[in-house]
Each structure stands twice: as C-alpha cells, then as structure tokens.
C-alpha cells in the first residue's frame, strides 16, 4: 500500500473522531456555540440562487442537527474521495468506472471544503480532542480491512469491489442526508442534504447498472 493511501486513511480516521466529540461529549459546548452562532455571520463558500438571501449560522433550535450532519458528512465524503483515488491509480479499470470515480471525487472534494467553512463560521471546531471513542451514526463507512481489499484488488475484481462498496457508502450518505433534511434548520446545510440525496441516489442506480455489466 502506498504512502498516500495511508495518509488518506489517517485523515479519514482523524475526521471521524470529530464526530465523537459531537455525539458523545459536546452538549455543553454546543449550547455555548449555539448562542454565538446566531450572530448573523454569512457562511462562506455557499451559492445562492436568484432571490435567495445569504443565510446566517443555524438557529439555536436546529444547531446541533446541522453541526452533527456536517461533522459526519465531512469524514464520509473524505472516505469516498479516498476510495476514488485508489481506483484512479489502477490500470485496466473499465472506463465507465474510472469516469464515475472521477465524478465522485470532483463533487465531494469541494463539498468538504464548503462544510469545513461552515463549521468555522459557526464557531464550531472542525476537529475535537483525540482519544475519544468513535461515535455512532457513521452510515456506510468502510472499515480498514475493506479499504485494504480495495487497494489490493485489480482489474474487473477491483471495479466490482469499488462499485459494491460505494453503493453501500452512498446509501449511508443518503440516510444521513435525509435526517438533516428533516431535522436541520440552516438553509444551506438543508439544501446540501437534499442535493446529496438527489445526486447520490442517481449514482447508486448508475453503479448498480454498471455492476450488472461486469
């Protein structure tokens, strides 16, 4: 396994640790940051359609849901990018699978940057103290052994494994995004959750169709 793969794995694990702080031990800090998050600062990195006003940080009542969604989705997206990078380094992969990996990386990389910007604008730490137990709720995440298998696989075997793993990964993201669509209050975070549902459900079907041809 190459050095870059190990680095990406470490990054995804470190990002996932941030979730633990949100789900297991941040009730006090959330209350404090909820107060500061209602100051009306616009969130960086958001796009608004015609007639839409620039939104402020999430209201106190939905702050925890929005922050939890972002903190979960950042490491989730990071792993999807990592899995895509693994595939893009391989030889003899079907062109359709390589194109899909490229599309996933191109879409989710910028979304990670956007969500990190939101946490900063909400006065929420992007990373929590290390050493805390992994929190629940990380739907569809691959384990270390899953990533090792993907890294070692070649050709058609690798393509099939990537599609199978990414279908499960996308299904987890869709489930988390639907929760944000219901429970979140920040307009930009809710819109992102809806975009994730729409785009990743379409990709799930695309991957199922590709898998049937291999």
Image (spheres, helix red, strand yellow):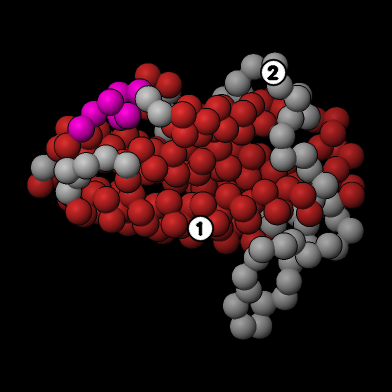
Q: Which residue is mark 1?
A: 194
The answer to whether any part of residue 184 appears in the image is no
Residue at (39%, 52%) from the top-left corner?
104
Task: Please identify the quadrant where the C terminus is shown.
Answer: top left
Number of the front mark, 1 or 2: 2
- 31 and 138: which is toward the camera: 138
Apparent side of residue 86 relative to residue 159 in the rendered image (left or right):
right
Magenta span: predominant SS is: helix
Residue 59, given in percent of the width and then of the height, sits at 79, 54
212 over 148 or under it: above or below: below
Q: Pointer 1 and pointer 2: residues touching (CB < 8 Å)?
A: no
Q: Which residues are magenta?
A: 148-154
> Residue extending furthest front?
3
Mark 2 lies on a secondary structure that is loop
Tell which residue pokes out farthest to the left in this image.
213
Query: Which residue sits at x=69%, y=18%?
Result: 132
Element type where label 1 sits in the image: helix
Q: Is residue 157 magenta?
A: no
- Is 133 left or right of 13, judged from the image as shown? right
Q: Nearer the viewer, residue 106 or 138?
A: 106
Res. 64 image quadrant:
top right
Q: CA distance from mark 1 to mark 2?
A: 31 Å
In the rendered image, is residue 50 in sight? yes
In the image, what residue occupies the spot 81% across and 37% down? 30
Q: Residues within 10 Å of mark 1 (few under 14, many from 20)?
A: some
Tell me the number on the disc at residue 66: none
Q: Position of residue 165 (x, y in %)?
A: 32, 34
Which class describes the residues within 10 Å of circle 2: few (<14), some (14-19), or many (20+)?
A: some
Q: Is residue 135 above or below residue 213?
A: above
User: Which residue is denoted by mark 2 in the rendering?
Assistant: 132
Is residue 91 shown left or right of residue 22? left
Task: Answer with the quarter of the image where residue 17 lies.
Answer: top right
């Amino acid at each position: 396994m190459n050095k870059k793969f190990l680095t990406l794995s470490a990054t995804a694990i470190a990002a996932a640790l941030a979730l633990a702080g949100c789900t297991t031990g941040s009730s006090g800090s959330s209350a404090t940051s909820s107060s500061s998050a209602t100051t009306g600062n616009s969130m960086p990195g958001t796009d608004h359609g015609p007639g839409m006003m620039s939104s402020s940080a999430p209201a106190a009542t939905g702050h925890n849901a929005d922050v939890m969604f972002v903190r979960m989705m950042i490491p989730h997206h990071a792993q999807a990018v990592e899995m895509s990078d693994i595939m893009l380094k391989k030889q003899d992969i079907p062109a359709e699978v390589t194109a899909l990996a490229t599309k996933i990386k191109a879409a989710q990389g910028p979304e990670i940057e956007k969500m990190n910007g939101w946490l900063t604008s909400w006065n929420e730490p992007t990373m929590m103290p290390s050493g805390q137990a992994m929190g629940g709720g990380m739907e569809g995440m691959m384990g270390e052994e899953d990533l090792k298998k993907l890294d070692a696989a070649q050709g058609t075997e690798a393509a099939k494994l990537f599609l199978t793993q990414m279908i499960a990964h996308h299904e987890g993201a869709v489930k988390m995004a639907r929760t944000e669509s219901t429970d979140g209050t920040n307009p930009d975070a809710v819109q992102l959750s809806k975009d994730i549902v729409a785009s990743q459900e379409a990709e799930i079907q695309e991957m199922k169709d590709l898998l049937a041809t291999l």
